[in-house]
Amino acid sequence: MRDTPFGRVPRAAAAAAIACAAAAPALLRAQAAQRTVTGQVVEEGTNAPLPAAQIQVRGTTTGTVTGDDGRFTLRVGAGEAVLLVRRIGYPAVTVRVAPGESTVRVAMRKDALQLDQVVITGQASAISRRNLPNSVASVSAEEVTKVSAQTIEQAFQGKIAGAQIAQSTGAPGGGNRVRIRGISSILGNASPLYVVDGVIVSDAAIGTGTNIVTRAAGSAISVSNQEAPVNRIADLDPNQIENVEILKGSAAAAIYGSKASGGVIVITTKRGVAGAPQWNFRGGVGTARLAYRNGQRRFTTLEDATRAFGPTAAQFYDPTRFIDYEDLAYGNRPVNNDLALQVSGGTESTRYFVGLSSREEDGIVANTFARRHGLRVNVDQRLTGRMQLQVGSEVLRTQSDRGLFGNDNAGNSIAYTLTKIPSFLDLRRNADGSYPRNPFYPSNPLQTIERFQNDEGVWRNITTGRLTWEIARRERQELRFVGFGGVDVLSQRNEVYSPPDLQYEPLDGLPGTTAVSGASNQNANLNLNAVHVWRPVRAIAATTQLGTQWERRNFSVNRASAQNLLGGLEVVTAGTIRDVDEQRLLVDDFGIFAQSEVLVAERLLLTAGARADRSSNNGDPGKYYLFPKASASYRFGTLRRGLVDDVKLRVAYGETGNQPLYGQKFTPLDLSNIGGAGAFRVGTGRAASDLRPERQREIEGGVDLALFGNRVTADLTAFQRNISDLLIIRTLPPTSGYSSETSNGASMRVWGGEAAIAAFPLQGALTWTTRFNLGANRNRITELPVAPFLLGAPQVGAVRIEEGRSATQLIGNDTLPQSGGRVVVPVVIGDGTPKYNAGWGNEIRWKGLSAYALLDRQLGGMLANGTWRHYDLGQNSRDYDEVTATGQKLGEVRRTTYLQVTRIYYQDASYLKLREVTLGYDLPRPLVRRAWARANAARLQFSGRNLYWWTDFRGGDPEAENFGAGNVPGSVQRNRELAAYPASRQFWVNLNVEF
Amino acid sequence: MRAPPTARRAAVRPAARAALLAALALAGGLAACREVVVPNYNSPNVDQLTSAPTASTVNTTALGLLVGARATVGAYATTLGVLGREVYNLDGAEPRNVLGFLVGPLEPGGFGTDMGWTATYRQLLTAFTVLEAVERVPDYTAQQKEGVRGFTKTLMAMAYIDQLRIRDTFGIVLEVDPSARTLGPFVTREEGYARAAQLLDEARTHLQGGGAAFPFALHAGFAGFATPATFVRFNRAIKARMEVYRQRWPDALTALQESFLNTANPTPATLAAGVYHVYSTTSGDAINPLFDPAPRALTAVPSFLTDARRAADGSIDRRAAAKAQVGTVSLSTQGVTSNVRITAYASNVAPVPIIKNEELILLRAEARLATGDRAGAIADLNVVRTVSGGLPPLPADFAGDLVDEILYDRRYSLFYEYGHRWVDLRRYGRLAQLQKTLPSHRIFPIVPIPIDECNQRDPRPRGCVQVSGF
């Protein structure tokens, strides 16, 4: 194990630490006669030269950076010089240069296991992973961009122990659910908090407005949980990310106070490295294919056809015709591209990073697509010897059309309609461009695919700034100020256009529907911190910080819709029937944070801290809620060299909160009008007046091991979280006049464990890296001050919140024999929480060749298969005609009994997926140089995402989910799939060039 | 490369540190002191009504009772219409409209069992809140207060009656406690009707002291009934319907006398006179939920046309011809097929009757028959069937079952308005006359109490049972 100098941070991106390192030598100065030292920095094992390594002469501010060939030249004092060599991805190395030496060779070992990574522990402090008292997962840039992903969450799938990440829809553009360490709330916010370079960014999921067409839930223009909206983290560009840290538990996330109950995902973007401009180009071309199929019924007799589709079927029945509608609807063969061009460089005082990217993806359904274009500029400027400014700004443009999918009550959702079309019916486009009328259902999905428009466009800017000021530094004490903050401004526009000539449009006598929505969201935050470091003796360092954080979120969405479009125009003013809608939201939060960390002899780390938060969402907006934390870790160091190289025991306790959502504290009067006069009605829900944040108290403990000459690391963690003051929107007896009430009250316990094992079994010409992670959790409602209540309806599956039971237990109807007949009763049919989630990635490299595969496994969990149910209800499922033991048709039995036996369509959501695969080849350097003299390296790669899977879930994707995604709470109620955009397999070819 | 700072320069400068800490404390302190109170941007809050109500707020809320009454039209006309085999809901996207209401069983947690239960109690809570608020409005005159009370109590009685028709002998709850700490007990059907009758009578007294005008303007559906004096006639019409339901025939006849019943110079227009729910396409207003022109889901049960009687010239009952016709679209869901389009409502803003003269005449026929006035009953029926149906009159000495005749006329005069047929057949114990399309279908005489009500009551109300039908 190499010496890691105390207080040094081996990663250029941690700016505070850089300032510290740069100023440190001021304390020990010995300027005398000078000499020149030259040298080269290479990678251990491969001996490849390492450019951009930073070299500093200890005790001075003298330093330099290696060139392309890994070489450097330095002026040092006449005596022995100690060089500190740092480079991203490699643990720092110190090298002694004796007085007589003038050349030096530095070999750095690649830190494949990220032992020396720095992890944030406070608003303005960080610590080496070696001492970290919590389990914090990290995902590097390399891992995020292994296989082109629609969104960063998708790129995380299978890589984080204890995170359950599922793709709600297969539609281009994303839409994911991330749940870290199980559920943390019943009806509060369930998503993690996302922080980019210190700024809290929005993960809003803003509905598209298709509900006006599908009528999936009432007649409002938009009902976002029915519309599978994109959660806006999808805007972030994975190419610009340097590193991601996932603060899983309250103990780590307590620094984010009352917004951190779902965990915190801390994203750091790439920053410039001093030196000549370094260019990197990554280009990919890809395509996608339908991954899962439902199949269709084959009607062998006219009687079957008329029984299922009525007497009209006789006019269309043809026993020889079998049309595969999944092929027709989902058979588009897109040509996708993913391009990124980045340049980084600068001087010691000014460094820059510029990244430009473009990703254009079409769906397996024609006319659906997602596009993302982005530009990021990050600049680091040293203002004075003690003051460093870092700014970054990213402009993103995201556009998509995700078609018309999901639940529907108007007969036009594409996947829904597919379940109702007999295979003998030909709905393909006529030669004149018109479409045959579907006689059995209100729409022709092939016409809908061609003509329906669901355009979404987002402009987004995330601008961040960070000022680090070294106020004072003495031998034993340092004081610095770290201020950071920024804004995330998002503007989204949706245009839903359903032209008058679509089959379903004239049904209501109002042909043509259009809905236009404009949403804007601004997140602004500012953190001011003072950090004091005190070293009373050499072996002890105490870091204390005091800070404030202010955040404001301002959201509004305006919608207008029109029906009966004159002239078929898209514009709302063309409609004779218009509707408007507006929703606003403002949240203002303020927190005060104090923390002290004491590191003793680099072995023992003790931390204590607290945060006090107030929020305008609480019943009392002026009241502060305190969230303390404390942790300890102890490194035993090397017990037996080469066998047990490091052992760390850690225990951490922390509290976080979960704010009420905006508006939950109000008991509103509904607005409407009748006959031209305004009308108030008492609303359907009411609120307790003293709403306060949910409080999570989490204790976690674990052991981290480095074994076999640091070739294996293992992190084992167990946690238990007690959540009190849970917000419950409990169902009230309707005779109270209200349907629901929001209050604090219930308690829940969540417990579980995680294991993350990384190993480097082979190191040499042939290298093999393997990473395994596993996370499992269980939960139980420990206290419920109200009667058990249902979320959802037992016929289609409901969650029952009940003391002493899992908060994700699923209740469904069952028919039980009873004297004198049978009775339908609600019974427990399973649990929505998986038994475990695990990921296993392996990478093998040999010379320029590499192969990588990631398997992702979920065991357990249950999901209602709504698409299958609708194939049955349409008497159209592939196995409908199979005969049961009692001689009935299998589909007939399911169709006629499911309302009394809910479990028929509840399926095990277990899966094993081949998430990511890559095959890469580093083109030989001479060849690359011959092709283009400026190029340093080039790499060709074939990759794929979701290439194969094993699951018993029928027809669809066991990750899919229709209700609950979006901004509607639904933390526990995420177990229904219905007519989602189908999942696809993705294939890519990439070329990566450095120059 | 920058020259290294000297040790002296690097020493802590107390002034700078103090300044910084002061700035930090100031920034933090300022931000902390300035707590941000964010209002509800999206709607007013109920405390506007409960703390210091103004006339304007209470007026607007009183009109909200009309929105609340209208909110259940779809459930009553369509769902009760399906139970009473007036209409089918053959929505292919929601097969439970067939599997749930024609096959069943009906269970507390089953599809659509709510049938306006939740909306009714929300309506009642709004009404109770208005009654409380009225007492504290400083800018109402005494007469205006009486007007608001009379209006509100009439709508409250309507809400009770709405649910009594559906839950029948399972009973309902009368008291609404907004704190939900104490739940009102279930009362029997008879107690429920008694409370509704009491409210209607109290309302009449209030309305009689209500002066020349309500403090708010009623919509066009109340044309002719928009002042306290004329609203009383609507109140009596509701009372008459209720008294017929509970077979207090003399009371029904008394109420009818005070209502707007009118048989003078009958024309289709005079029969249609009455009080209506109105619709518009204005943003924030509602459209007629019974209008399905294509149709996409809502069809008439084909027997509505085939059971219709014919005039002397062989033409079909005008009521049947006007309210349904065979269309080009044949809908088929779960083995149920219909190509009979509902034409009872001409557009998506066509008004839906709350109660109309035609029903009052039929109510009087029923009450007269029950009180032994057979000739009077026949005279009333003949007004309706000749003017509205274009059918030949019954002979004055008609000896057949007059109940059958009344039920026939009620079926065709009141088709797809309020689920009348199901309620009427049950009142006379004749639900078995309903035809089942498939052997698996059932007739349900009553609807259980919804699960959300059952779950939170111990002991469970007796209506919390599965209804298997017959």
Image (cartoon, rainbow, N blue to C red):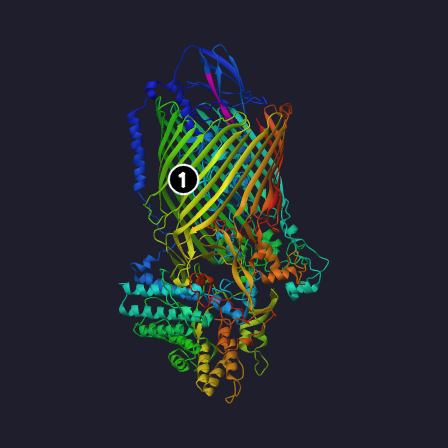
Q: Residue at image x 47%, y 36%?
A: A702
Amino acid residing under circle 1: Gly
Q: What percent of the width, then of the height, locates residue A471?
A: 34, 26
Q: Is residue A91 magenta?
A: yes
Q: Residue furthest right?
A: A320
- Secondary structure under the numbered disc 1 in the rendered image: strand
Q: Is residue B426 magenta?
A: no
In magenta, the rendered stretch is A82-92
- In screen coordinates, is B134 left or right of A601? left
Q: Which residue is mark 1?
A: A654
Q: What percent of the width, then of the height, locates residue B162?
A: 44, 70
Q: Residue furthest bottom?
A: B397
Q: Which of the 4 image quadrants contains residue B133? A: bottom left
Q: Nearer the viewer, residue A925 or B165?
A: B165
Q: Residue at image x 61%, y 45%?
A: A984
**Residue A45 visible here:** yes
Q: What percent of the width, then of the height, locates residue A411?
A: 57, 58
- In screen coordinates, is B208 left or right of A98? left
Q: Nearer the viewer, residue A39 or A741?
A: A741
Label 1 neighbourhood size at 10 Å, few (<14), some (14-19), many (20+)? many
Count of marks overlaid on the render: 1
Q: Is residue B341 above or below residue A504?
A: below
- In screen coordinates, is A79 left or right of B140? right
Q: Nearer the viewer, residue A46 or A670?
A: A46
- In screen coordinates, is B149 left or right of A374? left
Q: Chain of mark 1?
A: A
Give the quarter of the figure containing the C terminus of chain B.
bottom right
Give the quarter of the figure containing the N terminus of chain B.
top left
Q: Is residue A982 above or below residue A443?
A: above
Q: What percent of the width, then of the height, locates residue B194?
A: 38, 74
Magenta span: chief secondary structure? strand
Q: Is residue B64 above or below residue A357?
A: below
